[in-house]
Amino acid sequence: MNSSVIVRAPLHVQVAERLRLLIDSGELAPGTRLNEIELCNTMGVSRTPLREAIRSLATEGLIELQPNRGAIVSIVSQEDVTEILPIMASLEGLGGRLAAMHMDQSKIAQVRKIHNQMISHYKNNEVAEYFETNRLIHELITEGSGNQTLVETINSLSAKVRRARFTAQMTKESWATAVSEHEEMIAALEAQDPDRLEAILVQHVETKRATILGSIEQNQ
Amino acid sequence: MNSSVIVRAPLHVQVAERLRLLIDSGELAPGTRLNEIELCNTMGVSRTPLREAIRSLATEGLIELQPNRGAIVSIVSQEDVTEILPIMASLEGLGGRLAAMHMDQSKIAQVRKIHNQMISHYKNNEVAEYFETNRLIHELITEGSGNQTLVETINSLSAKVRRARFTAQMTKESWATAVSEHEEMIAALEAQDPDRLEAILVQHVETKRATILGSIEQNQ
DNA sequence: ATATCGTATTTTGTATGCAAAATAAAAACT
DNA sequence: AGTTTTTATTTTGCATACAAAATACGATAT
């Protein structure tokens, strides 16, 4: 009996999640060396589950293993981002195509709602809120594809781009472009037009690429 | 000094490789429970590196962890394949597009050479050799994209499809279709026409999907 | 003062040990 | 006989201990 047993996640999974959070938030910056005993102390676990977690994150690409010298938070280079973005474009495009085919009206209405919120954040110049609603829209569309493998693949890639943290330097122009593309996106979704939504999403990531590469040049 | 130190790979990496091989070859069939002590004995290592390897392969998706009950070789369902193939189509298409843009004449000539070999294997009805040259062509094109992240993403996905082992039941018709698509592929590549190569590759995976789903229905 | 060598310390890599959970086996009961 | 309960065995999860490699430090020599 008891078909809904709550099995608390294994330690190495919990540790992996905490580490992922620390890396994602930037608390553990790229290049930081991960000292095992130190991390063990702060997390209150022994080295075995910690090391298992590190191995996991390494195969995910978040961490880089240096034989006999431990692990560092992997450094996402400009080349990495340049490689990842066209892949993201293809996959987000596919996600949009499938979403336009599969999402029902109520889910589309939900996206529209968040879209409207996003627009008002844009108008009020609320950057953080804008980014959050933006992210949520893309997430909803991707999930609307009904393809879980696609969702996971995109998430894994986007995690790396996000860590590069180039997005902050959005200009007024690129922001406006992004917003107008979002208007087209929501229109294509409501029209349930797969080809159009796919094309817009591919274009949207291309805009993002231009923005990012622009801000990188400014930085260096 | 000594910039090219040969560091022998850590045990857990070696173990992961061996496990991957066993799973890929089918020696460890999907669903097989992985007994730690048993595997430790056959591989001659202790449980620590073995467990680290298992965690790695689990995040790769090759193995499924069952808390407090160990790990099993993950089972690739028909749904999984149905999800993966459209993703592969997009990514192989992108790979082709980039390859058509970036590959130089000598590399294209190399692909042509293998292509010709493949055709003769087809004519001689040498199935295994056909599949091998086929695989090699796709690999060369994908690598020709110059996008290493793309190569890795495709490999990881195609590993799962391959493990499902549906490909054997190719009919004469679907084989002929695949070959004629390959003719178009090599033509588009030699013409260095990104749009055309992308379209053909997407179509090619669609053909594969039809073949696979057809043979699944026959099986069940 | 700088460079090099050798030693001490730290840190990672691997093996083993103990506890808890799950499975298998045996005993008791209906 | 079949079902449940109890007990034993196996297997996993986590912690620790030991070995090997890498780093840090200091002494010696130039």
Image (tube, coloured by chain):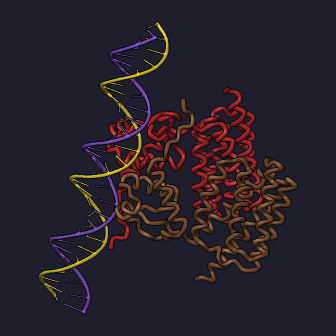
Chain colours: A brown, B red, C purple, D yellow
Q: Position of residue C5 (x, y in %)?
A: 17, 75
Quadrant of the image occupied by residue C11: bottom left
- Seen from the viewer's position, the closer of residues B77 and A105 is A105
Residue at 44% x, 66% y: name it: A72
Q: Is residue A25 left or right of residue D23?
A: right
Give the vertical position of B127 relative to D27 (above or below): above
Residue at 53% x, 35% y: name it: B30
Give the vertical position of A26 relative to A150 (above or below): below
Evaluate whether residue A4 shows in this view: yes
Identify the residue at the far right of this view.
A191
- Seen from the viewer's position, the closer of residues A58 and B137 is A58
Quarter of the rendering occupied by the N terminus of chain A: top right
- Seen from the viewer's position, the closer of residues A93 and A44 is A44
Q: Position of residue A87 (x, y in %)?
A: 66, 60
Q: Position of residue A204 (x, y in %)?
A: 75, 66
- Seen from the viewer's position, the closer of residues B4 and B121 is B4
